[in-house]
RNA sequence: UCCUCCUUAGCUCAGUUGGUUAGAGCAUCUGACUGUUAAUCAGAGGGUCGUUGGUUCAAGUCCAACAGGGGGAGCCA
């Protein structure tokens, strides 16, 4: 039996003086030939193992190196030293796995995030990344709890799809056809009838359309799974493979949709604060250090926890696209020609415009609604003005668009008209249109980028540090 | 994909108007010390200066191309 061990988190939280304990973990540092800082990932805190001088042989001591894994048996006692409440007075120490210090890349010092990204297989062993992934876990758990409490059904939508009509960007092709000797038709085009599915298929860019089908019977569903975009995006907020939460609700209009999205985001933040206090405090301190490196003008006004608490305590600002344009046109930034891109009704809001609205003007999350129909997807419900659709984007400080959603067009003729205008193949989408033929109801939904949410809560500025093994153009190591 | 900056020891970085043998802190190794907190002190080892080509008597330093990375932009979540 191996698992008579106690996790360090549990030992530090509820251990009692003199308690006999077995712990296992990885050595962070070994000081003074007697103090081992041991971490097992259950908490950011290390347990100090004290091996009294003279009790262990020199040859054995040399094997206790940063990164080595070991088992320690001993008694929990109040620590006479500063910096920790408890320590484990070792009776027995056993090396589980040696770690050559000449070759091990992690040192007990600060490493740059860029360097750690290159050793993503080992970066879990740092304080920063173990904290990020504990928070990420909590958020994932909270997502299920939030929807479960509200009677939503967790739906698994397909990862391989034949639809390329969602208008959400470039896709990854899924095929078993050979690269050499690809079967061709007489006109030279690839003969997909010989492919695995007998037709062109790709990795999903969204589970929304399938989600709508289920919502037309189960009323309220959500998906939470991986999503793929083959765009050549090289930014701190894009991944080729990311996770997305897409709730879809029957009998919801745009306002219901916004209310749910705001409640959802606040629930996730609340959950992390309640369950990951220590990790968030560590990440907040880390962020503060990072901010100090920046020039005064670029520093954020708030610390991480202040920011999260502020978001919790305040209503998201809700404005229409038209109002947003008016505010931008009247802004000092516009009048002083600070914007690189021009502002006028009909344009898609640029990053600089969104950032100005969120970070300079409102200084809190902003929900922008009712965008011009030209710049939005075919399935969004057309408003009576004939110009706009019932769309909503939630813009978060430092992240940008974190949620994109809409009330869906449930009126068959209106939907088909829009599909024709946007050259969406109506015939192939027969199954989608059937929901509008058979008992259509008003419904709405949105997509929340999970890694962007993780970024927002942890304060990590690059999305590649919010997922264990980031997939980006020219990068699929690990 | 575009703009911009960067690439020097295992890591983080200095390196002057181009000039002789390229430095520091941390890490590693050796020794000392022993209630330490990224332990401390002394010493040692460690470099094809991203790659290729060019300019020059002379290139880490100047120029070009390529590769990788950061920041910003587009596309979006």
Image (spheres, coloured by chain):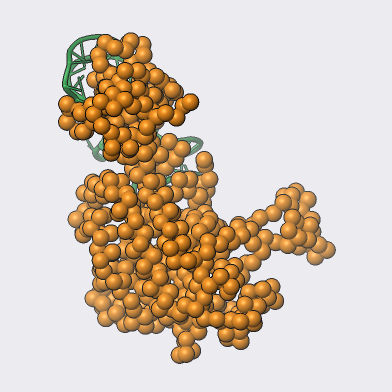
Chain colours: A orange, B green
**Residue A445 vs residue A125, the one in the foreground:** A445
Examine the rendered structure and indicate whether residue A72 appears above or below residue A436. above
Residue under the point 20% across and 28% down: A79
- Residue A307, quarter of picture: bottom left
Residue located at (34% from left, 56% from top): A271
Residue lying at the far bottom in this picture: please name it: A385
What residue lies at 44% left-to-right and 66% top-to-bottom?
A150
Q: Can the viewer see residue A256?
A: yes
Please provide percent x and percent y for residue A454. 39, 54
**Does residue A192 appear left or right of residue A305 in this picture?**
right
Q: Is residue A386 above or below residue A235?
A: below
Q: Tell me if residue A111 can be seen.
A: no
Image location (x, y in percent) of residue A213: 60, 71
Residue extending furthest toward the right: A186
- Residue occupying the point 32% across, 50% down: A275
Query: Residue A14 at what x, y percent from top left?
Result: 28, 37
Note whether A4 is above or below A468 in the view shown: above
Q: Quadrant of residue A46?
A: top left
Residue A29 locus on image (x, y percent): 30, 27
Is A439 placed above or below A85 here?
Answer: below
In this view, the residue in front, B23 or A257, is A257
């Amino acid at each position: 039996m191996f698992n008579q061990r106690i996790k360090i988190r549990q030992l530090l939280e509820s251990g009692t003086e003199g308690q006999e304990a077995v712990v296992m973990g990885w050595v962070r540092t070994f000081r003074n030939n007697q103090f081992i800082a041991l971490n097992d990932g259950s908490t950011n805190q290390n347990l100090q193992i004290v091996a009294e001088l003279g009790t262990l042989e020199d040859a054995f001591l040399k094997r206790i190196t940063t990164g080595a894994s070991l088992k320690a048996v001993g008694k929990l006692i109040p620590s006479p030293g500063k910096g920790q409440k408890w320590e484990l007075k070792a009776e027995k120490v056993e090396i589980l796995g040696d770690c050559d210090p000449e070759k091990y890349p992690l040192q007990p010092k600060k490493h740059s995030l860029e360097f750690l990204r290159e050793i993503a297989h080992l970066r879990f062993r740092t304080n920063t990344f173990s904290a990020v992934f504990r928070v990420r876990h909590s958020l994932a758990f909270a997502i299920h709890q939030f929807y479960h409490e509200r009677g939503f059904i967790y739906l698994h939508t397909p990862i391989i799809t034949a639809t390329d009509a969602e208008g959400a960007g470039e896709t990854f092709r899924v095929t078993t056809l050979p690269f050499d000797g690809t079967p061709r038709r007489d006109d030279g085009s690839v003969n997909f009838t010989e492919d695995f599915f007998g037709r062109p298929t790709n990795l999903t860019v969204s589970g929304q359309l399938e989600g709508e089908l289920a919502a037309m019977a189960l009323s309220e569903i959500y998906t939470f799974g991986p999503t793929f975009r083959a765009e050549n995006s090289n930014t701190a907020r894009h991944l080729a493979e990311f996770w997305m939460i897409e709730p879809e609700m029957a009998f919801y209009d745009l306002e219901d949709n916004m209310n749910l999205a705001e409640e959802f985001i606040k629930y996730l933040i609340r959950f992390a604060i309640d369950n990951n206090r220590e990790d968030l405090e560590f990440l907040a301190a880390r962020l503060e250090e990072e901010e100090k490196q920046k020039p005064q003008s670029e520093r954020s006004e708030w610390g991480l926890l202040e920011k999260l608490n502020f978001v919790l305590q305040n209503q998201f600002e809700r404005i229409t696209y038209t109002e947003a344009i008016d505010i931008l046109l009247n802004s000092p930034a516009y009048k002083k020609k600070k914007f690189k891109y021009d502002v006028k009704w009909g344009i898609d809001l640029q990053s600089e415009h969104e950032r100005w609205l969120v970070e300079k003007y409102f200084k809190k999350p902003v929900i922008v609604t009712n965008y011009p129909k030209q710049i939005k997807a075919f399935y969004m419900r057309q408003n009576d003005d004939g110009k706009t659709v019932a769309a909503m984007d939630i813009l978060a400080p430092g992240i940008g668009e974190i949620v994109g959603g809409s009330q869906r067009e449930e009126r068959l003729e209106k939907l088909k008209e829009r599909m024709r205008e946007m050259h969406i193949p109506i015939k192939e989408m027969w199954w989608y249109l059937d929901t509008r033929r058979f008992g259509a109801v008003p419904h709405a939904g949105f997509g929340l980028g999970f890694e962007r949410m993780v970024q927002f809560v942890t304060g990590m500025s690059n999305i590649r540090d919010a997922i264990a093994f980031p997939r980006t153009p020219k990068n699929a190591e690990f």
